[in-house]
Image (cartoon, rainbow, N blue to C red):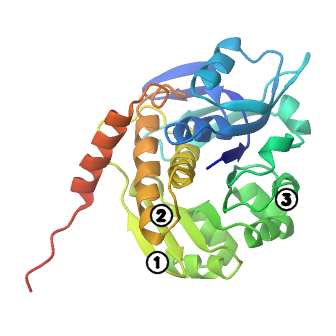
C-alpha cells in the first residue's frame, strides 16, 4: 500500500556530550521517510532551498523516496535548526530556528499522491495539516503528530485534525497539556474522546503507550548502551510505525502492537548516531535481529500462582 509523509526537510546543527554536526540532514519528513523506507516507498511532501546539498537528494532517492512533492525554491535557503543536549539528553535546547523557505510551505499534493492509503502528518501547522486532509481521497490510516506550540496557539484547528485522524501521536507533556490530566491513562482516554481511534503517548527513554477502544498497550524503550543524538527519534518512531502498517494486508490490534515494536527499534538505531546515519544503512536482517532481542527483553513468563 502507498504511504505519504508530509513535513519538514531540514538542515540541523546539533551538539551533544558525544560530538557535534553542522548542517546535517534532518527534518521530520526525512527521519520518518528513512524509517518507513524499510517497509515501503514513501511519498514525501516538503520544501527546501537551492542550498540543499545534492548528496542528500541522492540519499533520499537511494532510499526509494518518491520526491515528486519535494519543492526546491530557487535562491531559497533551507529550514535550519540548531540545538544542543546536556546530561542525559532528555531535552533539546534550541539555539536557533531559521524557517527560511519552510515559512511559506504550502503542501499541495501531486495528483498521484492524493490516493495515498497511509498518511503521516508530521509536526507542522495544523492549518497545513487540514489542507493536506482536504486533498486526500479515502485514506486507510492518518497518523498525526503535533507539538506544544500548536496546542497553545492553534488549538481549534488542531482539534479538527485530531477528529479527522485515525491515530494521534503526542508526548507526555503534550498529552497532559491537552487534557489537564496527570495520569497518562486518563489522558489517553480523554484524547480518544476527541475523535481518533488510537492515541500513542511517547515517553522518551521510558518507551511509549497506546490507547484505543479495542486495546491498551505499553512498551519500554530499547535499552541502549550508546546514545549519541536523540534528534528525530520521535519522527523515526512514527515512520517505522506507519511504514510497517502500510506493508501489512490489514490493520489489527496485533499488527499495531508489532508496529510499535518496529517504530521503537528503528528509533533506537537513530539515537546511536548523529543525524540520519544510524538508520540509512540498515538491513532487514539487522532490524529483525534487534526486534528479536527486544521481544526477549520485554517478555515476561507467566507466574505459576
SS for dot 3: helix
Seen at 45% across and 76% down, the residue is 216
Q: Which mark is residue 215?
A: 1
Instruction: Classify residue 207 by image quadrant.
Output: bottom left
Binning the other alpha carbons within 10 Å of mark 2 as few (below 14), some (14 to 19) or many (20 upward) gives many
SS for dot 1: loop
Q: Which mark is residue 256?
A: 2
Binning the other alpha carbons within 10 Å of mark 3 as few (below 14), some (14 to 19) or many (20 upward) gives some
Q: Position of residue 268 (x, y in %)?
A: 41, 42
Q: Position of residue 183 (x, y in %)?
A: 51, 78
Instruction: Classify residue 70 by image quadrant.
Output: top right
**Could you tell me if residue 88 is visible in this image?**
no
Instruction: Say which quadrant the C terminus sits in.
Output: bottom left
Q: Position of residue 302 (x, y in %)?
A: 15, 75
In this picture, residue 264 sits left or right of residue 31: left
Q: Position of residue 224 (x, y in %)?
A: 32, 41
Instruction: Name the foreground residue: 276 vs 242.
Output: 242
Seen at 62% across and 74% down, the residue is 197
The residue at which mark 3 appears reads as: 130
> Pointer 1 and pointer 2: residues touching (CB < 8 Å)?
yes
Amino acid at each position: 500500500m502507498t504511504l505519504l509523509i508530509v513535513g519538514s526537510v531540514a538542515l540541523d546543527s546539533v551538539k551533544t556530550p558525544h560530538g557535534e554536526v553542522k548542517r546535517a540532514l534532518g527534518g521530520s519528513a526525512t527521519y520518518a521517510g528513512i524509517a518507513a523506507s524499510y517497509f515501503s516507498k514513501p511519498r514525501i511532501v516538503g520544501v527546501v532551498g537551492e542550498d540543499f546539498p545534492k548528496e542528500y537528494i541522492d540519499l533520499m532517492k537511494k532510499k526509494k523516496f518518491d520526491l515528486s512533492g519535494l519543492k526546491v525554491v530557487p535562491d531559497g535557503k533551507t529550514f535550519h535548526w540548531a540545538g544542543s543536549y546536556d546530561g542525559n539528553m532528555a531535552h533539546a535546547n534550541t539555539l536557533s530556528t531559521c524557517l527560511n523557505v519552510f515559512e511559506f510551505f504550502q503542501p499541495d499534493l501531486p495528483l498521484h499522491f492524493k490516493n495515498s492509503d497511509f498518511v503521516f502528518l508530521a509536526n507542522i501547522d495544523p492549518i497545513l495539516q487540514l489542507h493536506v486532509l482536504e486533498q486526500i481521497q479515502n485514506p486507510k490510516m492518518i497518523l498525526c503528530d503535533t507539538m506544544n506550540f500548536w496546542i497553545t496557539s492553534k488549538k481549534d484547528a488542531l482539534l479538527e485534525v485530531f477528529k479527522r485522524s485515525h491515530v494521534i501521536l503526542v508526548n507526555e507533556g503534550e498529552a497532559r497539556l491537552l487534557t489537564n490530566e496527570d495520569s497518562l491513562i486518563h489522558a489517553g482516554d480523554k484524547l480518544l474522546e476527541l475523535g481518533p481511534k488510537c492515541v500513542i503517548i511517547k515517553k522518551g527513554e521510558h518507551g511509549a503507550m497506546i490507547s484505543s477502544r479495542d486495546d491498551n498497550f505499553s512498551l519500554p524503550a530499547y535499552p541502549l548502551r550508546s546514545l549519541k543524538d536523540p534528534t528525530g527519534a520521535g519522527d523515526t518512531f512514527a515512520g517505522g510505525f506507519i511504514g510497517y502498517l502500510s506493508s501489512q494486508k490489514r490493520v489489527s490490534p496485533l499488527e499495531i502492537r508489532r508496529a510499535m515494536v518496529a517504530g521503537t527499534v528503528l528509533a533506537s538505531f537513530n539515537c546511536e548516531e548523529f543525524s540520519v546515519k544510524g538508520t540509512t544503512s540498515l538491513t532487514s536482517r539487522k532490524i529483525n535481529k534487534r526486534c528479536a532481542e527486544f521481544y526477549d527483553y520485554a517478555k515476561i513468563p507467566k507466574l505459576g500462582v
